[in-house]
Image: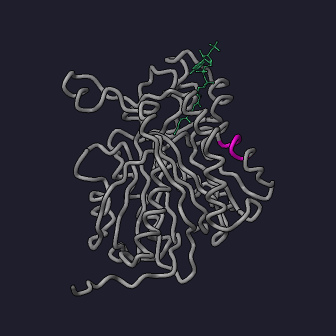
């Protein structure tokens, strides 16, 4: 039997560009609270959220993701036509098919790219980092554009006391490119479908369409909270071991911006020293699912706290229940 050719493998991949898009409209807790008999104080105390952004009626996952993607390309200093693969993490794209990635590749001008979406909810961005790293090291791609983009306001029930105040809209993107020096450590990931009902779109979209109601994101808040606080610390520890570094070597910790109390609990479990900057973008951005980690990186950069080339720990977790975490060098 003859041997088939395979691409030459490369030593590593790293994030070389970062871009973000935050919609204009700022929505305060005071605006959402009356419909759910809540208050600014309660929302801030339970989640850390002060305000969030909602996209405009004309904006979509794809349009927001394309802006973030274009900004990431400019930051990396590479042409859209040099992108080999566009990966988009989202659960709020308006079409089950075609993909958001095909639309975003078109909008950014990535005319030579393969394009596909991944469905891993709030873990989607970290799943994408792991996938991009693997594609690049296997020699299947040299430059990947990874976008996390969400318009969760489209699928939120503003009368639901458990979700109305948490979720928000926005997009973030990174360019990941081949590198002589590895800049992305192994991804620790998994999913537990036995808990698929903990965060789920209800009714499912087909049933909703058939009976003429809207499909909304629903969540068993306490169950998700206990799972995240109980197990994401260990996922982070495994990611640190896989990277061969200690928590004190980190420059920043950028977890999914689910809830400030979850972030604080993981920080405590990891016993992170003061020297590690902790992303708290949820306060002004809300929970933007797959977009939250690149948006939080962007906020750190704006504050002068994201040091390019320094190790950061990222971890995403949510519906599925899917999770993924890795150490990577900051873009
Ligand atoms: C959603 C969440 C903030 C709710 O907080 P909680 O402390 O679990 O709230 P509970 O449901 O236990 O309710 C506690 C009390 O607040 C009240 N309450 C619930 N929702 C409220 C609201 N929106 N506003 C005001 N009061 C509310 C309840 O009635 C209850 O009152 P009681 O003690 O008098 O009975 C919390 O469960 C959470 O953060 N979960 C994880 C969410 C998350 O990260 N999701 C994304 C994963 S990707």
**Residue at the location (54% across, 52% down)?**
293
Q: Quadrant of the C terminus?
A: bottom right
In this rendering, the answer to whether 157 lies above or below 322 is above
31 relative position to 136: left or right: right
Dominant SS in magenta? helix
323 relative position to 45: left or right: left
Residue 265 is covered by the magenta coloring: yes
Q: Which residues are magenta?
A: 263-267
Q: Is residue 23 among what the camera can see?
A: no
Q: Is residue 184 among what the camera can see?
A: yes
The quadrant of the rendered image in which ligand 1 is seen is: top right
Image quarter of residue 85? bottom left
Residue 165 is covered by the magenta coloring: no
272 relative position to 87: left or right: right
Horizontal and vertical percent for residue 6? 32, 82
**Residue at the location (51% across, 54% down)?**
189
In this view, the residue farthest toward the left is 210
């Amino acid at each position: 039997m003859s041997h088939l050719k395979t691409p030459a493998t490369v030593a590593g991949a790293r994030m070389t560009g970062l871009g973000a898009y935050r919609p204009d409209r700022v929505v305060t807790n005071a605006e959402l609270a009356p419909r759910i008999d809540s208050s600014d104080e309660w929302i801030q105390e339970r989640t850390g959220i002060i305000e969030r952004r909602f996209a405009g009626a004309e904006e979509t996952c794809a349009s927001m993701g394309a802006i973030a993607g274009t900004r990431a390309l400019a930051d990396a200093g590479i042409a859209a036509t040099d992108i080999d693969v566009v990966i988009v993490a989202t659960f709020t794209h308006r079409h089950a098919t075609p993909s958001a990635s095909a639309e975003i590749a078109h909008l950014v001008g990535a005319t030579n790219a393969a394009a596909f979406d991944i469905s891993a909810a709030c873990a989607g961005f970290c799943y994408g980092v792991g996938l991009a790293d693997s594609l690049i090291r296997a020699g299947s791609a040299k430059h990947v554009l990874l976008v996390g983009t969400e318009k969760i306001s489209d699928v939120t029930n503003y009368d639901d006391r458990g979700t109305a105040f948490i979720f928000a809209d926005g997009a973030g993107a990174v360019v990941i490119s081949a590198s002589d020096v590895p800049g992305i450590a192994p991804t620790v990931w998994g999913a537990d479908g036995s808990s698929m009902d903990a965060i789920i779109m209800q009714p499912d979209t087909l049933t909703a369409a058939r009976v003429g109601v809207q499909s909304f994101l629903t969540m068993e808040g306490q169950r998700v909270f206990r799972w995240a606080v109980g197990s994401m610390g260990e996922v982070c520890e495994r990611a640190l071991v896989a990277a061969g570094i200690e928590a004190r070597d980190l420059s920043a910790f950028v977890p999914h911006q689910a809830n400030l109390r979850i972030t604080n609990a993981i920080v405590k479990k990891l016993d992170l020293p003061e020297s590690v900057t902790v992303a708290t973008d949820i306060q002004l951005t809300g929970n933007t699912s797959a977009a939250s980690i690149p948006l939080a990186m962007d906020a750190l950069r704006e504050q002068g706290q994201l040091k390019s080339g320094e190790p950061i720990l990222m971890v995403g977790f949510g519906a599925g229940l899917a999770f993924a975490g890795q150490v990577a060098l900051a873009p």
